[in-house]
Image: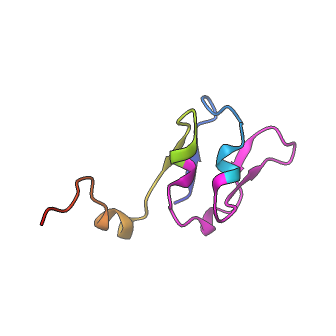
Amino acid sequence: MPPVIDKTICGNCGTCIDNCPLDVLHWSADGRETEVKYPEECWHCNACKLDCPNGAIQLRLPLPAMLLYTTSPHKN
C-alpha cells in the first residue's frame, strides 16, 4: 500500500522526495514528475504526506496498521 500522489494538485516541488527516509519516492525518468519508485519499501511513516505543501499525497495504511491506528490520545 504505497503513497498515492494526486498529479492534479502535485506541484512537483520534490519535498516528498527529499523527506522520504527510505527513498521510496523519486523523480520520473524525464525528471518532470514525482513517482513512487519502490512501493514495497514504504514504512508508512507519513513523512511525505505531512511535508507536502499542496496536500497531494494520500497514504493508504495496510490492514494491520489500520487496526492499531487511533485518532484520539489515550486517556489514563
> Considering only vertical position in the picture, is 24 above or below 51?
below
Q: How is the image coloured?
A: rainbow
Q: State the image coordinates of residue 19 (x, y, percent, origin top left).
A: 64, 53
Q: Is residue 19 above or below residue 66?
A: above
Residue 17 in magenta stretch: no
Q: Which residues are magenta?
A: 19-48
Q: Main secondary structure of the magenta part?
A: loop
Q: Seen from this angle, which residue lies furthest right?
A: 30
**Quarter assignment of residue 43:** bottom right
Seen in the picture, residue 36 relative to 5 is either above or below; the reply is: below
Residue at the far front: name it: 76
Q: Residue at x 56, y 45 (%)?
A: 51
* Residue sitting at the far top: 8
- Residue 37 magenta-highlighted: yes
> Where is the C terminus found, in terms of image quarters?
bottom left
Residue 75 location, x and y as percent?
14, 62
Residue at image coords 29%, 66%: 67
Relative image position of residue 23 (x, y in whole percent): 70, 61
Position of residue 33 in the picture relative to residue 7 (left or right): right
- Residue drawn at point x = 81 percent, y = 37 percent: 32
**Residue at the image point whose x is 27% and y is 53% from the top:** 71
- Looking at the rendering, which quadrant does residue 65 occupy? bottom left
> Does residue 24 appear to the left or right of 58 in the view shown?
right
In the image, is 29 to the left or to the right of 38?
right
Give the number of callouts. Answer: 0
Quick one: 61 or 53, which is closer to the camera? 53
Measuring from the top left, give residue 44's x and y in whole percent.
50, 62
